[in-house]
Amino acid sequence: MNYPLITLYVPGTRPELIEKAGRVSPDAVIIDLEDTVPTDRKNQVRQDIADILPSVALPALIRVNNEPDFLEADLRAMTNQHVYALFLPKAEDPAQIQEVDAIMAEAERAGGLEVGSVKLIPMMETALGVVRCFELATAAARVESVSFGSAEDGDLQGDLQCAWSLEGTELMYARSKVLLDARAARLPYVLDGAFSDIKNDDALRIDCQLSKRLGYDGRTAVHPQQVAVAREAYAANADELDYYHRLITAFE
């Protein structure tokens, strides 16, 4: 498949929404086992999602739980031929990335898959994660991208104890550092995070345009109507297409 640049979150507790997600044509659907699933339902929801994955038409990404009680079980259940990549929330420790990589490799071998088939996307959602982004991005070969926690009232904003504005000044250093580290790590694409205000397409468009100017390739969406806005904002414009066409012509 092509890289999942514009993706849509679906709560793990609402599997009926996975099929509906296809109507807005995201590159992939992110099935969430973390924030949207109550603690007392996590084991059952994990099993429910594992059962329906073979029937999911869209490329599937899974946001797992980065908690000792659930992480390993999530990794073993979701590292399979029906999943393109796993999102690891609040990634902070390169050693943990290596441990996750080893568990995923065991699951791949058990399932008859080539090791490294299922990709890993650490999420930069804490101050320490941002500081260590390069080390996290290079900790395992299966790390294909990183995702920046740009959401208003999100984990990173809370950890930084900063304000949030559409101008983006408060998170600008962290947002730029994650992009810089990901490029230095030679990751093929870099994802921006969710935009919380699902009723304001104009604000989303402004934020996507800023994100693209910084160098991000796409982002995660939390509502179906955000997908088209994000795709348009991150798409190459006429000037960019003309530039690349002339560049290709010059090398031919």
Image: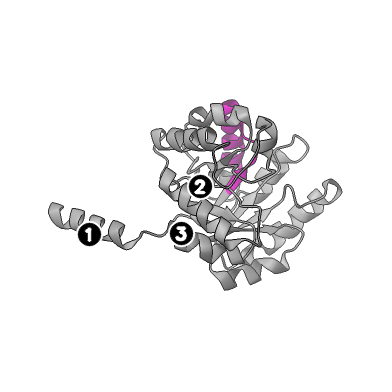
Can residue 81 be seen at all in this image of the molecule? Answer: no
| Spot occupied by residue 207 in the image (x, y as percentages of width and height) | 53, 51
Question: Of 164 and 231, which appears nearest the observer?
Answer: 164
Q: Is residue 184 above or below residue 79?
A: above
Q: Quadrant of residue 65?
A: top right
Task: Describe the element under mark 2 as helix, strand or loop.
Answer: strand
Question: Of 236 and 165, which appears nearest the observer?
Answer: 165
Q: Quadrant of the N terminus?
A: bottom left
Q: Amino acid at mark 1?
A: His
Marks 3/1: CA–CA distance: 20 Å
| Spot occupied by residue 212 in the image (x, y as percentages of width and height) | 44, 50
Question: Of 153 and 222, which appears nearest the observer?
Answer: 153
Q: Earlier in the sequence, mark 3 or mark 1?
A: 3
Q: Quadrant of the C terminus?
A: bottom left
Residue at figure coordinates x 64%, y 36% from the top left: 156
Residue at figure coordinates x 51%, y 47% from the top left: 191
Residue annotated with mark 3: 233
Q: Which residues are magenta?
A: 86-107
Residue annotated with mark 2: 191
